[in-house]
Amino acid sequence: MTSTHATPRPKRLGALAMLVGLPSLVYYAWLCVDQNQGALIAPRSLTELGQWMARIPGPTTTSILIYLAWFGFQVLLQLLVPGRWVEGTQLADGTRLRYKMNGWLSFWITWLCLGGLVLSGWLKPTLIHDHFGSLVTTVNLFVFILSVFLYFRGRSSPRAERVTGDPLTDFCIGASLNPRSGDFDFKFFCESRPGLVGWVAVNLSLAAKQYELHGQVTVPMILVNVFHILYVADYFFHEEAILTTWDIKHENFGWMLCWGDLLWVPAMYSLQAYYLLHHAHDLPAPAVAGIVALNLAGYYVFRSSNLQKHRFRTDPDRPIWGKKPEFLQTARGTRLLVSGWWGVGRHINYLGDLMMGLAWCLPCGFSHPLPYFYITYFIVLLVDRERRDHRRCAEHYGADWDEYCRRVRWRILPGVY
């Protein structure tokens, strides 16, 4: 356990701002796309603001049952579906945790079960859309309850990492790096199962609602759904790669990550599909071809760069682009890859992410700015993450990091940044 000195006031204020501001932002975005045709809402008085806030629904019996069934089903899949056991990266104490890789099979079992329920008439395909506002409130409450559990569990654990001693800050950022119950890892599970798969479920429900309202599923809606399904399916196909990501290796698991995984992802990443529900426009063939090409190019950069780094960590002699990998041997014993994509940029995988993110927004056209929230947010997120990683590596590697930055000049976008 690290120092328990009082947390500086700015950190407490930052935690409070996230706890209040982020849920408010989700409600605001939902009100815009659901009740204002995607146009931004600008209340002109406190009375009007109160009227908009009054439209936010509370949890209902149906929304509670939907989410508990969904979360519980994903837990059962994680526990019961067979999969390979692999070890994560080495922890500070030299140990490695075990993780079961069954996400790919669980992903398809989910759609087989949901598809069967829809085709049999037991499940209405527009169910998520029809209860979306209540589901947002339900998940908000669920995450706060789960985060209280994680906080007290982390505080009582002998392996609590990087806690500050301030309850509000530790509740927000987490009091433990890897909270577990046996081999069930809360962070690993929440990073993917309920939220990522739920994101696809939200999109499909919105596509079904568009068909119900307009008698068709438009090309832009199809593009957004296909792009997102490809992204999530690819994630589970390469599920083991998550074990070397920043979140798994370095971030404590508290309200911030838990809320982001379980609510932010399915609610905010589906904004394009929600917008298209009420904007059933078409796209010319050249625009469709360009958007598809941008998404595929971004996917290639993102996936191939991540695979290069992952394979280098597991097999340092495996060729990259037909050549033996080049790397910088640090004084700490770590190898920094400078071959392939990782000789082009220090976080070139972020460039692929951003290219895909832009392709997800473009089908919405340019009538309103809200559908472009995702790419705007992701630019801020990834630049901030790159900066934090740079500071951490500079402290960790010292002069070796200076040499690495000299050899790999560009951070994310070659020639620009």
Image (tube, grey):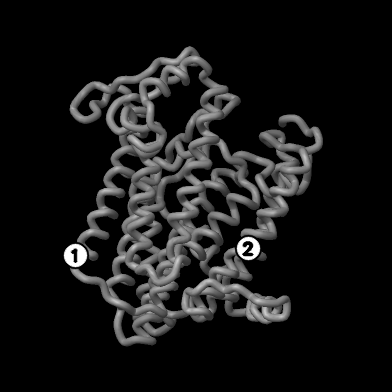
Vertically, is 298 above or below 35? above
Q: Secondary structure at mark 1?
A: helix
> Marks 2/1: CA distance?
38 Å
Q: Nearer the viewer, mark 2 or mark 1?
A: 1
Q: Position of residue 182 (x, y in %)?
A: 59, 44
**Front residue of 383 and 197:** 383
Determine the image quadrant of residue 365.
bottom left
What amino acid is labelled 1 in the image? Pro
Crowd class of label 1 (few under 14; some 14 to 19; many from 20; radius 10 Å): few
- The image's mark for residue 187 is none
Determine the image quadrant of residue 66.
bottom right
Residue 207 appears left or right of 400: left
Residue drawn at (57%, 75%) of the image = 133
Vertically, is 101 above or below 158? below
Q: Secondary structure at mark 2?
A: helix
**Front residue of 39 and 315:** 39
Q: Position of residue 88 (x, y in %)?
A: 47, 35
Vertically, is 19 above or below 300? below
Residue denoted by label 2: 23
Residue drawn at (66%, 54%) of the image = 18
Residue denoted by label 1: 286
Q: Quadrant of the C terminus?
A: top left
Vertically, is 139 above or below 102? below
**Front residue of 77 and 224:** 224
Q: Earlier in the sequence, mark 2 or mark 1?
A: 2
Judge whether residue 379 can be spotted in this image: yes
Judge whether residue 68 can be spotted in this image: no
